[in-house]
Image: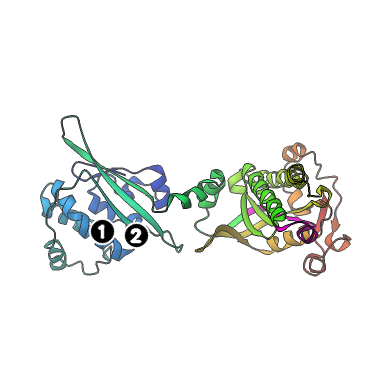
Amino acid sequence: MICDSRWRLVWVSAELRALMGEEDPGKLGIGKHIVEALCAGPWSNVIDPEVQLKMFMETWPLFVHDTPGGVDGVKAAFKRGLTVNPEGPFGFDDVSDEAVDALFAQVTPREPSAVYTDSFEFVQGDLPPTPINETSVRIRDSDGLFLGTVVFYAPALPARVLSLVSRGNEGMFERMSRLVEPGRKQAAVLFADLQASSALSRRLPSAAYFRLIRELTTAIDEVVGDNGGIVGKHAGDGVTAFFLAEDLGSPSEAARAAVTTAREISGLAKRVAGELADEIGIIETELCRINVGVHWGGRLYMGQLITGGRLEVTALGDAVNECARIQESAIDGEILASKSLIEHLTDSDAAALELDPDSVLYRTLAELPAASEKARRDASDLPVTPL
Protein backbone atom coordinates (compact mmCIF):
# COMPACT_ATOMS: atom_id res chain seq x y z
CA MET A 1 0.00 0.00 0.00
CA ILE A 2 1.04 3.65 -0.43
CA CYS A 3 0.68 6.59 1.94
CA ASP A 4 1.42 10.19 1.03
CA SER A 5 3.81 12.53 2.86
CA ARG A 6 1.18 13.25 5.53
CA TRP A 7 0.48 9.54 6.10
CA ARG A 8 -2.84 9.53 4.27
CA LEU A 9 -3.62 6.18 2.69
CA VAL A 10 -3.80 6.68 -1.08
CA TRP A 11 -3.52 3.22 -2.67
CA VAL A 12 -4.01 -0.47 -1.82
CA SER A 13 -3.06 -3.18 -4.32
CA ALA A 14 -5.63 -5.53 -5.80
CA GLU A 15 -4.01 -8.53 -4.11
CA LEU A 16 -4.07 -6.90 -0.69
CA ARG A 17 -7.70 -5.86 -1.19
CA ALA A 18 -8.54 -9.45 -2.07
CA LEU A 19 -6.82 -10.74 1.07
CA MET A 20 -8.67 -8.15 3.12
CA GLY A 21 -11.95 -9.20 1.53
CA GLU A 22 -12.84 -5.56 0.86
CA GLU A 23 -12.97 -3.53 -2.36
CA ASP A 24 -14.81 -0.44 -1.10
CA PRO A 25 -12.28 2.47 -0.95
CA GLY A 26 -14.30 4.13 1.81
CA LYS A 27 -14.22 1.07 4.05
CA LEU A 28 -10.50 0.63 3.39
CA GLY A 29 -9.96 4.23 4.49
CA ILE A 30 -8.54 5.59 1.23
CA GLY A 31 -7.90 9.31 1.72
CA LYS A 32 -7.77 9.03 5.51
CA HIS A 33 -4.79 9.15 7.85
CA ILE A 34 -3.28 5.67 8.11
CA VAL A 35 -4.05 5.44 11.83
CA GLU A 36 -7.71 6.27 11.23
CA ALA A 37 -7.86 3.87 8.26
CA LEU A 38 -6.34 0.97 10.21
CA CYS A 39 -8.99 1.33 12.89
CA ALA A 40 -11.63 0.29 10.34
CA GLY A 41 -13.02 -3.23 10.39
CA PRO A 42 -11.22 -4.68 7.32
CA TRP A 43 -7.79 -3.88 8.77
CA SER A 44 -8.42 -4.50 12.45
CA ASN A 45 -9.84 -7.97 11.68
CA VAL A 46 -6.72 -9.39 10.06
CA ILE A 47 -4.11 -8.84 12.78
CA ASP A 48 -4.23 -10.06 16.35
CA PRO A 49 -5.42 -7.05 18.45
CA GLU A 50 -2.58 -7.16 20.96
CA VAL A 51 0.00 -7.48 18.18
CA GLN A 52 -1.52 -4.54 16.31
CA LEU A 53 -1.44 -2.32 19.39
CA LYS A 54 2.23 -3.23 19.91
CA MET A 55 2.93 -2.39 16.26
CA PHE A 56 1.13 0.92 16.63
CA MET A 57 3.16 1.86 19.66
CA GLU A 58 6.31 1.17 17.62
CA THR A 59 5.18 3.03 14.48
CA TRP A 60 3.23 5.95 15.95
CA PRO A 61 6.48 7.84 16.66
CA LEU A 62 7.26 7.55 12.93
CA PHE A 63 3.77 8.72 11.95
CA VAL A 64 4.07 11.63 14.38
CA HIS A 65 7.23 12.82 12.62
CA ASP A 66 5.37 13.56 9.36
CA THR A 67 1.77 14.12 10.49
CA PRO A 68 0.64 17.77 10.70
CA GLY A 69 0.09 18.54 14.37
CA GLY A 70 2.53 15.86 15.51
CA VAL A 71 1.28 13.80 18.45
CA ASP A 72 -2.00 15.69 18.54
CA GLY A 73 -2.53 15.05 14.83
CA VAL A 74 -2.06 11.30 15.19
CA LYS A 75 -4.17 11.26 18.34
CA ALA A 76 -6.99 13.04 16.48
CA ALA A 77 -6.76 10.44 13.68
CA PHE A 78 -7.00 7.64 16.25
CA LYS A 79 -10.06 9.22 17.88
CA ARG A 80 -11.72 9.54 14.46
CA GLY A 81 -11.00 5.85 13.96
CA LEU A 82 -12.78 5.07 17.21
CA THR A 83 -16.00 6.45 15.73
CA VAL A 84 -15.72 3.69 13.10
CA ASN A 85 -14.74 1.01 15.60
CA PRO A 86 -16.24 2.29 18.88
CA GLU A 87 -15.63 -0.93 20.81
CA GLY A 88 -11.92 -0.21 20.73
CA PRO A 89 -9.63 -1.71 18.08
CA PHE A 90 -6.31 -3.44 18.60
CA GLY A 91 -6.81 -4.61 22.15
CA PHE A 92 -7.45 -1.06 23.37
CA ASP A 93 -10.62 -1.54 25.38
CA ASP A 94 -10.76 1.76 27.25
CA VAL A 95 -11.59 4.47 24.69
CA SER A 96 -12.12 7.31 27.15
CA ASP A 97 -10.30 10.58 26.50
CA GLU A 98 -8.20 9.98 29.60
CA ALA A 99 -7.09 6.54 28.41
CA VAL A 100 -6.27 7.81 24.91
CA ASP A 101 -4.30 10.73 26.37
CA ALA A 102 -2.37 8.33 28.61
CA LEU A 103 -1.57 6.11 25.64
CA PHE A 104 -0.26 8.98 23.52
CA ALA A 105 1.72 10.40 26.41
CA GLN A 106 4.10 7.51 25.74
CA VAL A 107 4.66 8.58 22.12
CA THR A 108 7.78 10.55 21.24
CA PRO A 109 8.42 11.63 17.61
CA ARG A 110 11.21 9.73 15.88
CA GLU A 111 12.57 10.31 12.40
CA PRO A 112 12.04 7.20 10.28
CA SER A 113 14.95 5.57 8.49
CA ALA A 114 14.82 5.26 4.71
CA VAL A 115 13.79 1.60 5.01
CA TYR A 116 12.41 -0.15 8.07
CA THR A 117 10.83 -3.53 8.67
CA ASP A 118 8.39 -5.28 10.96
CA SER A 119 6.58 -8.60 11.13
CA PHE A 120 3.21 -9.85 12.27
CA GLU A 121 0.78 -12.75 11.86
CA PHE A 122 -1.97 -12.27 9.30
CA VAL A 123 -5.33 -13.69 10.39
CA GLN A 124 -7.95 -14.74 7.84
CA GLY A 125 -11.21 -16.03 9.26
CA ASP A 126 -10.68 -19.08 11.44
CA LEU A 127 -7.67 -20.30 9.45
CA PRO A 128 -4.23 -20.64 11.06
CA PRO A 129 -2.32 -17.31 11.09
CA THR A 130 0.27 -16.60 8.40
CA PRO A 131 3.63 -14.98 9.29
CA ILE A 132 4.15 -11.79 7.27
CA ASN A 133 7.13 -9.49 6.80
CA GLU A 134 6.36 -5.79 6.37
CA THR A 135 8.87 -3.48 4.68
CA SER A 136 8.31 0.30 4.55
CA VAL A 137 10.29 2.40 2.06
CA ARG A 138 10.26 6.19 2.21
CA ILE A 139 10.14 7.79 -1.24
CA ARG A 140 11.77 11.12 -2.14
CA ASP A 141 12.00 13.10 -5.36
CA SER A 142 15.24 14.12 -7.06
CA ASP A 143 15.53 17.15 -4.77
CA GLY A 144 15.18 15.03 -1.63
CA LEU A 145 11.60 16.13 -0.90
CA PHE A 146 9.69 13.45 1.03
CA LEU A 147 6.75 12.18 -1.08
CA GLY A 148 5.37 9.29 0.93
CA THR A 149 5.84 5.69 2.00
CA VAL A 150 5.38 2.43 0.14
CA VAL A 151 4.64 -0.57 2.36
CA PHE A 152 5.33 -4.07 1.01
CA TYR A 153 3.95 -7.26 2.56
CA ALA A 154 5.40 -10.69 1.86
CA PRO A 155 5.22 -14.16 3.43
CA ALA A 156 7.81 -14.61 6.17
CA LEU A 157 8.86 -17.99 4.81
CA PRO A 158 12.27 -19.40 3.87
CA ALA A 159 13.00 -19.54 0.14
CA ARG A 160 13.02 -23.34 0.19
CA VAL A 161 9.43 -23.34 1.51
CA LEU A 162 8.26 -20.70 -0.97
CA SER A 163 9.76 -22.77 -3.77
CA LEU A 164 7.45 -25.66 -2.86
CA VAL A 165 4.38 -23.44 -3.10
CA SER A 166 5.51 -21.86 -6.38
CA ARG A 167 5.64 -25.24 -8.08
CA GLY A 168 1.87 -25.61 -7.94
CA ASN A 169 -0.69 -24.63 -10.55
CA GLU A 170 -1.26 -20.90 -10.04
CA GLY A 171 -4.75 -21.00 -11.54
CA MET A 172 -5.76 -23.82 -9.23
CA PHE A 173 -4.37 -22.02 -6.21
CA GLU A 174 -6.38 -18.97 -7.22
CA ARG A 175 -9.55 -21.08 -7.34
CA MET A 176 -8.68 -22.62 -3.98
CA SER A 177 -8.19 -19.16 -2.48
CA ARG A 178 -11.82 -18.29 -3.27
CA LEU A 179 -12.92 -21.06 -0.91
CA VAL A 180 -11.53 -19.41 2.21
CA GLU A 181 -15.13 -19.12 3.45
CA PRO A 182 -16.74 -22.61 3.40
CA GLY A 183 -20.16 -22.85 1.82
CA ARG A 184 -22.55 -24.70 -0.48
CA LYS A 185 -21.34 -25.19 -4.05
CA GLN A 186 -22.46 -26.86 -7.26
CA ALA A 187 -19.67 -28.97 -8.70
CA ALA A 188 -18.79 -32.01 -10.75
CA VAL A 189 -16.85 -34.55 -8.68
CA LEU A 190 -14.12 -36.86 -9.98
CA PHE A 191 -12.46 -39.84 -8.34
CA ALA A 192 -9.54 -41.66 -9.96
CA ASP A 193 -7.58 -44.64 -8.70
CA LEU A 194 -4.85 -46.94 -9.99
CA GLN A 195 -6.45 -50.37 -10.35
CA ALA A 196 -3.58 -52.79 -9.75
CA SER A 197 -1.73 -50.74 -7.17
CA SER A 198 -1.32 -53.59 -4.67
CA ALA A 199 0.05 -55.94 -7.30
CA LEU A 200 2.37 -53.26 -8.67
CA SER A 201 3.69 -52.34 -5.22
CA ARG A 202 4.56 -55.98 -4.58
CA ARG A 203 6.17 -56.61 -7.97
CA LEU A 204 8.20 -53.42 -8.28
CA PRO A 205 11.13 -52.15 -6.22
CA SER A 206 9.94 -49.48 -3.80
CA ALA A 207 11.91 -46.78 -5.62
CA ALA A 208 10.34 -47.66 -8.97
CA TYR A 209 6.83 -47.85 -7.50
CA PHE A 210 7.31 -44.49 -5.77
CA ARG A 211 8.39 -42.89 -9.05
CA LEU A 212 5.37 -44.35 -10.82
CA ILE A 213 2.92 -42.98 -8.23
CA ARG A 214 4.67 -39.60 -8.11
CA GLU A 215 4.66 -39.23 -11.88
CA LEU A 216 1.03 -40.31 -12.14
CA THR A 217 -0.13 -38.00 -9.36
CA THR A 218 1.75 -35.05 -10.84
CA ALA A 219 0.29 -35.69 -14.29
CA ILE A 220 -3.27 -36.06 -12.95
CA ASP A 221 -3.01 -32.87 -10.91
CA GLU A 222 -1.76 -31.02 -13.99
CA VAL A 223 -4.69 -32.24 -16.08
CA VAL A 224 -7.19 -31.25 -13.38
CA GLY A 225 -5.65 -27.77 -13.10
CA ASP A 226 -5.49 -27.24 -16.86
CA ASN A 227 -9.21 -28.04 -17.14
CA GLY A 228 -10.28 -25.55 -14.47
CA GLY A 229 -10.61 -27.99 -11.58
CA ILE A 230 -9.38 -28.18 -8.01
CA VAL A 231 -7.53 -31.20 -6.68
CA GLY A 232 -8.93 -32.53 -3.44
CA LYS A 233 -7.39 -35.27 -1.36
CA HIS A 234 -4.64 -37.65 -2.41
CA ALA A 235 -5.17 -41.00 -0.76
CA GLY A 236 -2.43 -43.48 -1.62
CA ASP A 237 -2.61 -43.82 -5.40
CA GLY A 238 -6.05 -42.19 -5.64
CA VAL A 239 -7.03 -38.60 -6.44
CA THR A 240 -10.22 -36.58 -6.03
CA ALA A 241 -11.05 -33.41 -7.92
CA PHE A 242 -13.83 -30.84 -8.09
CA PHE A 243 -15.02 -28.66 -10.96
CA LEU A 244 -17.08 -25.79 -9.60
CA ALA A 245 -19.88 -24.33 -11.69
CA GLU A 246 -18.93 -20.82 -10.55
CA ASP A 247 -15.34 -21.33 -11.72
CA LEU A 248 -16.18 -22.86 -15.09
CA GLY A 249 -19.14 -20.59 -15.89
CA SER A 250 -22.09 -22.97 -15.63
CA PRO A 251 -23.07 -26.44 -14.37
CA SER A 252 -22.81 -27.76 -17.94
CA GLU A 253 -19.28 -26.47 -18.40
CA ALA A 254 -18.28 -27.94 -15.04
CA ALA A 255 -19.67 -31.33 -16.08
CA ARG A 256 -17.93 -31.06 -19.43
CA ALA A 257 -14.61 -30.24 -17.75
CA ALA A 258 -14.96 -33.29 -15.50
CA VAL A 259 -15.61 -35.61 -18.46
CA THR A 260 -12.74 -34.10 -20.45
CA THR A 261 -10.41 -34.56 -17.47
CA ALA A 262 -11.57 -38.13 -16.92
CA ARG A 263 -10.79 -39.00 -20.53
CA GLU A 264 -7.35 -37.44 -20.34
CA ILE A 265 -6.60 -39.21 -17.07
CA SER A 266 -7.62 -42.52 -18.61
CA GLY A 267 -4.64 -42.39 -20.96
CA LEU A 268 -2.15 -41.11 -18.42
CA ALA A 269 -1.31 -44.41 -16.75
CA LYS A 270 -0.22 -46.08 -19.96
CA ARG A 271 1.79 -43.03 -21.07
CA VAL A 272 3.54 -42.49 -17.72
CA ALA A 273 4.21 -46.20 -17.24
CA GLY A 274 5.54 -46.40 -20.80
CA GLU A 275 7.94 -43.51 -20.24
CA LEU A 276 9.23 -45.11 -17.03
CA ALA A 277 9.49 -48.51 -18.73
CA ASP A 278 11.65 -46.97 -21.46
CA GLU A 279 13.88 -45.46 -18.77
CA ILE A 280 14.20 -48.24 -16.20
CA GLY A 281 12.77 -51.23 -18.07
CA ILE A 282 10.81 -52.95 -15.29
CA ILE A 283 7.35 -51.33 -15.47
CA GLU A 284 4.61 -53.54 -16.93
CA THR A 285 2.41 -51.04 -18.72
CA GLU A 286 -0.51 -53.45 -19.14
CA LEU A 287 -0.96 -53.49 -15.37
CA CYS A 288 -1.21 -49.69 -15.13
CA ARG A 289 -4.85 -48.78 -15.56
CA ILE A 290 -6.69 -45.92 -13.91
CA ASN A 291 -10.38 -46.27 -13.12
CA VAL A 292 -12.37 -43.03 -13.00
CA GLY A 293 -15.80 -42.05 -11.70
CA VAL A 294 -17.52 -38.71 -12.33
CA HIS A 295 -20.69 -37.50 -10.62
CA TRP A 296 -22.68 -34.33 -9.98
CA GLY A 297 -22.89 -32.60 -6.62
CA GLY A 298 -25.68 -30.06 -6.41
CA ARG A 299 -25.10 -28.97 -2.82
CA LEU A 300 -21.57 -29.84 -1.79
CA TYR A 301 -20.28 -28.11 1.32
CA MET A 302 -16.77 -27.06 0.32
CA GLY A 303 -13.92 -25.16 1.88
CA GLN A 304 -10.21 -25.06 2.57
CA LEU A 305 -8.64 -27.52 4.98
CA ILE A 306 -5.38 -26.07 6.26
CA THR A 307 -3.32 -27.63 9.03
CA GLY A 308 0.32 -27.49 10.00
CA GLY A 309 1.09 -30.19 7.44
CA ARG A 310 -1.19 -29.66 4.46
CA LEU A 311 -3.30 -27.33 2.37
CA GLU A 312 -6.23 -28.76 0.47
CA VAL A 313 -9.85 -28.28 -0.45
CA THR A 314 -12.36 -30.75 0.86
CA ALA A 315 -16.04 -31.31 0.21
CA LEU A 316 -18.81 -32.94 2.21
CA GLY A 317 -22.02 -34.35 0.84
CA ASP A 318 -23.68 -37.55 -0.38
CA ALA A 319 -22.42 -36.93 -3.92
CA VAL A 320 -18.78 -37.24 -2.77
CA ASN A 321 -19.38 -40.65 -1.21
CA GLU A 322 -21.45 -41.73 -4.21
CA CYS A 323 -18.68 -40.73 -6.62
CA ALA A 324 -16.24 -42.87 -4.65
CA ARG A 325 -18.59 -45.82 -5.05
CA ILE A 326 -18.88 -45.12 -8.79
CA GLN A 327 -15.11 -45.18 -9.19
CA GLU A 328 -14.84 -48.38 -7.18
CA SER A 329 -17.26 -50.02 -9.60
CA ALA A 330 -15.16 -49.21 -12.69
CA ILE A 331 -12.69 -51.78 -13.99
CA ASP A 332 -9.77 -52.08 -16.41
CA GLY A 333 -9.30 -48.36 -17.02
CA GLU A 334 -13.01 -47.65 -17.35
CA ILE A 335 -14.70 -44.26 -16.92
CA LEU A 336 -18.13 -44.36 -15.30
CA ALA A 337 -20.32 -41.25 -15.32
CA SER A 338 -23.52 -40.79 -13.38
CA LYS A 339 -26.84 -39.99 -15.04
CA SER A 340 -26.99 -36.84 -12.92
CA LEU A 341 -23.73 -35.55 -14.37
CA ILE A 342 -24.55 -36.43 -18.00
CA GLU A 343 -27.94 -34.71 -17.80
CA HIS A 344 -26.33 -31.47 -16.63
CA LEU A 345 -24.71 -31.14 -20.07
CA THR A 346 -26.24 -28.68 -22.52
CA ASP A 347 -26.67 -29.85 -26.12
CA SER A 348 -23.58 -27.93 -27.24
CA ASP A 349 -21.34 -29.24 -24.46
CA ALA A 350 -22.62 -32.79 -24.98
CA ALA A 351 -21.92 -32.50 -28.72
CA ALA A 352 -18.39 -31.27 -28.00
CA LEU A 353 -17.89 -34.44 -25.95
CA GLU A 354 -19.52 -36.54 -28.71
CA LEU A 355 -22.28 -37.59 -26.35
CA ASP A 356 -26.03 -37.70 -26.86
CA PRO A 357 -27.70 -37.55 -23.44
CA ASP A 358 -31.04 -38.51 -24.99
CA SER A 359 -29.74 -41.87 -26.22
CA VAL A 360 -27.49 -42.92 -23.33
CA LEU A 361 -28.44 -46.14 -21.57
CA TYR A 362 -27.68 -46.55 -17.88
CA ARG A 363 -27.19 -49.40 -15.45
CA THR A 364 -27.36 -49.19 -11.68
CA LEU A 365 -24.22 -49.84 -9.66
CA ALA A 366 -25.83 -53.00 -8.32
CA GLU A 367 -25.93 -54.38 -11.87
CA LEU A 368 -22.23 -53.89 -12.53
CA PRO A 369 -20.08 -57.02 -12.11
CA ALA A 370 -17.18 -55.03 -10.62
CA ALA A 371 -19.31 -53.15 -8.07
CA SER A 372 -17.84 -53.43 -4.60
CA GLU A 373 -19.83 -54.57 -1.59
CA LYS A 374 -19.70 -51.03 -0.28
CA ALA A 375 -21.06 -49.68 -3.59
CA ARG A 376 -23.94 -52.15 -3.54
CA ARG A 377 -24.69 -51.21 0.04
CA ASP A 378 -24.38 -47.42 -0.23
CA ALA A 379 -25.44 -46.59 -3.82
CA SER A 380 -26.95 -49.65 -5.41
CA ASP A 381 -29.65 -47.70 -7.30
CA LEU A 382 -27.33 -45.04 -8.72
CA PRO A 383 -27.55 -45.06 -12.56
CA VAL A 384 -24.22 -44.81 -14.43
CA THR A 385 -22.89 -45.25 -17.95
CA PRO A 386 -19.41 -46.00 -19.31
CA LEU A 387 -17.72 -43.29 -21.38
Badge 1 element: helix
**Marking on residue 55:** 1
Badge 2 element: loop
Q: What residue did someone put label 2 on?
A: 47
Identify which residue is drawn at 44% across, 49% down: 159
Residue 145 sits inside the magenta stretch:
no
Confirm or deny contact between disc 2 and disc 1 (CB under 8 A). Answer: yes
Q: Which residues are magenta?
A: 186-206
Instruction: State the residue in front, 340 or 308.
Output: 308
The quadrant where residue 301 appears: bottom right
Q: Is residue 186 left or right of residue 49?
A: right
| Residue type (three-letter) at the residue carrying disc 1 | Met
Horizontal and vertical percent for residue 380? 82, 65
| Residue type (three-letter) at the residue carrying disc 2 | Ile
Instruction: State the residue in front, 157 or 83.
Output: 157
Horizontal and vertical percent for residue 118? 29, 54
**Marking on residue 360:** none
Task: Tell me the distance, in whole angstroms, between the alpha carbons under discs 2 and 1.
Answer: 10 Å
**Rendered view: 192 above or below 353:** below
The quadrant where residue 348 appears: top right
- The chosen color scheme is rainbow
Crowd around label 2: few <14 · some 14–19 · many ≥20 (10 Å): some
Horizontal and vertical percent for residue 212? 71, 51
Identify which residue is drawn at 79% across, 68% down: 374
